[in-house]
Image: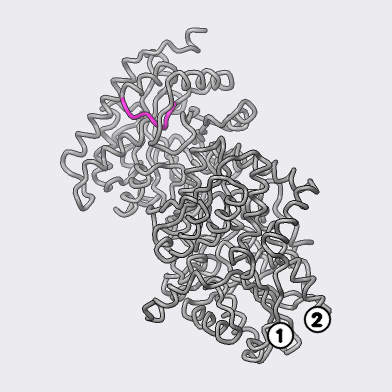
Amino acid sequence: MAGPNTYRGGPDDRGLFGIHGGRFVAETLMPLVLEVERAYDDAKRDPTFAAELRYYLEHYVGRPSPLYFAERLTRHCRGAKIYLKREDLNHTGAHKVNNTLGQILLARRMGKRRIIAETGAGQHGVATATVCALFDLPCVVYMGATDIERQKPNVFRMKLLGAEVRPVTSGTATLKDAMNEALRDWVANVDDTYYLIGTVAGPHPYPAMVRDFQTVIGDEVRAQMVKAEGRPPDTLIACVGGGSNAMGLFHPFLDEPDVAMIGVEAAGEGISTGRHAASLNGGMPGVLHGNRSYYLQDDDGQILDTHSISAGLDYPGVGPEHAWLFEQKRVEYVPVTDREALDAFLLLTRLEGIIPALESAHAVAAAAKRAPELPRNHLMVINLSGRGDKDVNTVAATLGVKL
Amino acid sequence: MSRIAARFAQLRADGRAGLVTYLTCGDPDRATFEKLLVRLPKAGADLIEIGMPFSDPMADGPAIQAASLRALRSGMTLAKTLDVLRRFRKTDGDTPVILMGYYNPIYRYGVPQFLKDAKAAGGDGLIVVDLPPEHDDELCLPARAAGLDFVRLATPTSDDRRLPVILNNAGGFLYYVAIAGITGTKSARAEVVAAAVARLRRHTSLPIAVGFGIKTPAQAAEVARVADAAVVGSALVEKIAKNLDKRSKAKPALMPAVLKDVTAFAAGVRKARPRHPARAAQ
C-alpha cells in the first residue's frame, strides 16, 4: 500500500495525526487550549514573532549548534560515517530550550503572567526556569518526587533560576504524575497561567507547536550536512521519550524516502521484563494527557509504571505524531536497554570526550549497533540531545562508585 | 422516559431539588462498596454517580485520586464495575445511575462492547471527563444511539459562545462544575453559582446539577435553592478515607458514617425547597 502524499501535512483541524493526537481534555481546559491554538496560528503568520525567536536562538541559545563529525566513534564502529548534532552545546545543555523560548514568546504575546511546566529529568524544567528568568515571569515546575531524588543538580539549578519546584508524590511520582499535577494547576488557574509543555505530547496544538519549535534541529542538520558532505544525511537517529528532539530532527526529512529514521525507545531492563518505557514497542493505543497515542497500560486501560535509567525517557506514552509515523512505518522505532545506554554513555565519553545525557546515550547505543552494517559513505546523524553532567550521580550509583 | 428524565420530573413535581452522590466503584473494596451502593437511595440519594476508577484522574483532587487508587488496589476493573451495577439493578430499578470516569479504560474495553454492557447492566448515563464535544464521534454519539445519556460538564470557563457547543449533544442533565479547578478543593460562593445557573438556563431546558466543592449540607442547600440537583462527591469519599484502618481496610464505622452524611446532605437539599425559577415563570 502506498503511503500518504506527504508525511509532513499533519495534524488536521482537530489535531489528529491519523487516529492519534486530538484534544482529550476536561471542558474547563477547552477554552484555554483553543486560545493557545488561535494565538499560535496568529504568531506563525507574524514575521516579527519569527524574527524575535531567531534573535534569541542565535544570541541567547548559541545556535546553530555544531554538526560534529565523530571520527573516533566512526572508526570504532567500522561502518557509516557518524555525525553528532550537538544540541548538548545549547545554553542550558539540551534541545529543550528551543521549545521553551518559542513558547515563552507566545505566552508573552498572549499576556499570560504565570508559567507552569512539568519535568522528568529536569532539562525541560531548567529550560523553562531559564526563559522565565529571562523574561521575568513567575515559574512553577512540577516534578515527581522520585525524579527530584535522582536529578538533584537540575532541581537546584531551577531554584537558582527563581523557579518554584513542586514535588509530586501521587501515582509513581515521575513525569506522568508531574503532567497530571500541571494539568490540575492549569484547570485551577485558568485566567493568568500558561502551561509550557516540554514535549510533542498533550492536547492539540502542543504536539505540532513543540515540533515546529524543534525543527530548527533538522533544518540546520540539512544545511550543515550539505556543506560538509555535499548532500543530505542518509540515516537519522534520536532517542524518543515524548519525542521532541527526534521530531525536530526527523520532520524536515519525512518526505525524503531515501532518508532512514530511527527512533530509540528506553527498554529499561528489557521489554520482556515489563520494567521499561518503550510505549511503541511495548504499549497499545490509548488516551492520556490530552491526546491519543501509544501507552503502557494493562488490559483494563490503567496506565502502568515505567522504568528507565534515564529520567527523561521515563514516561508511559509517546507523542502522537510518532505513533502515526510508527503505524505508517515511516520511522523505525527500536528499543535500547539501560545497560546498552550506559555502555554507550561510557563509550562516547572515552572516544570523543563528550559526556552525553543518558537519554541521548540511547541514541548513541542504537547508532553503534546499526553503523557497522552500513557502508563507509553512509551519512548517519545522531541527535546528541543533551549533555550528561546531570547524570553523573546516576551513572556513579549504577557503576557502584561512591562520589 | 429514561430513569434520569423520570427522576427529574418527579423532583419537579415534588417541588424540590435532588441529591446526586458520587462514590468510586470498589472504594475501599468491592464488598463494602456494594453494601453502600444499595443503601444510598434510602439514605437520600436521588441519583447515583459511580466512578469508574482510573490510574491517572487528571481532573480530580487528592480525595478522589486516592479513592481511585484504593479501588484499583482492591482489584476493581471496568468489567467489575459493570458487574457491580448489574447486581445493584436487581434491587433497585428506579434510581438513575451515571457512570463517571475517564476515556482510556472505556477505549481499551472497546466502545461498542462497553455501551452494550453498560446499557444491559442498567446504566442510564455517562460522564467522561476528558471527552469534549470536539470528540463527540468517539463515545457521545454512539452512546446516544445506544440509549445512554451523555451528560456534559459546563464550567466557569464556558462562555456564551462555548455553551451551545457543549449542549449540542448533551443528554440527561447538565452538570455545572461550580469552580475552575479540580474536585474537592475550593467552593464557589452561592451568589456566583446562582448567576451561573441563571445563565445556563438561558441556554438549555435540561435539568442542571451543580457540583465540585460542596462540602456541607448547608452548601448543598444553597445550591438546591437555584439548581435542580446538588452533586456531592469528595466529601463522601473523604469520609470513607477517614474510616479506614492502617491497612486501608474498612472499619465497622465506615458504612454508617458515610450513610449518615448522605442523609444529612439529603436533608439539606430537601429543606432548601427551591422555588424553581423555570417553574415560577410557567
Instruction: Answer with left or right where residue A106 lies relative to residue A350.
Output: right
Residue at the image point whose x is 58% and y is 55% from the top: A130
Residue behind mark 1? A81
Residue A203: where, in percent of width, then height?
59, 49
Callouts 1 and 2 on one subunit: yes
Quarter placement of the N terminus of chain A: bottom right
Q: Is residue A297 above or below residue A347?
A: above
Q: Is residue A364 magenta?
A: no
Residue B28: where, in percent of width, then height?
27, 46
Label 1 marks a residue whose chain is: A
Give the prevailing secondary structure in the magenta stretch.
Answer: loop
Q: Which residues, given as a range, are shown in magenta?
A: B210-216
Residue at the image point whose x is 77% and y is 73% from the top: A224
Residue at the image point whose x is 54% and y is 58% from the top: A126
Residue contact between numbered discs 1 and 2, judged by CB atoms under 8 Å: yes
Whole-angstrom CA distance, mark 1 to mark 2, is: 11 Å
Q: Is residue B168 above or below residue A228?
A: above
Instruction: Answer with left or right where residue B279 lies relative to residue A50.
Output: left
Residue behind mark 2? A229
Of the pair A368 and B233, the residue shown nearer to us: A368
Q: Amino acid at mark 2?
A: Glu
Label 2 marks a residue whose chain is: A
Instruction: Answer with left or right where residue A145 lies relative to residue A127.
Output: left
Q: Is residue A388 above or below residue B174?
A: below
Residue at the image point whose x is 62% and y is 59% from the top: A97
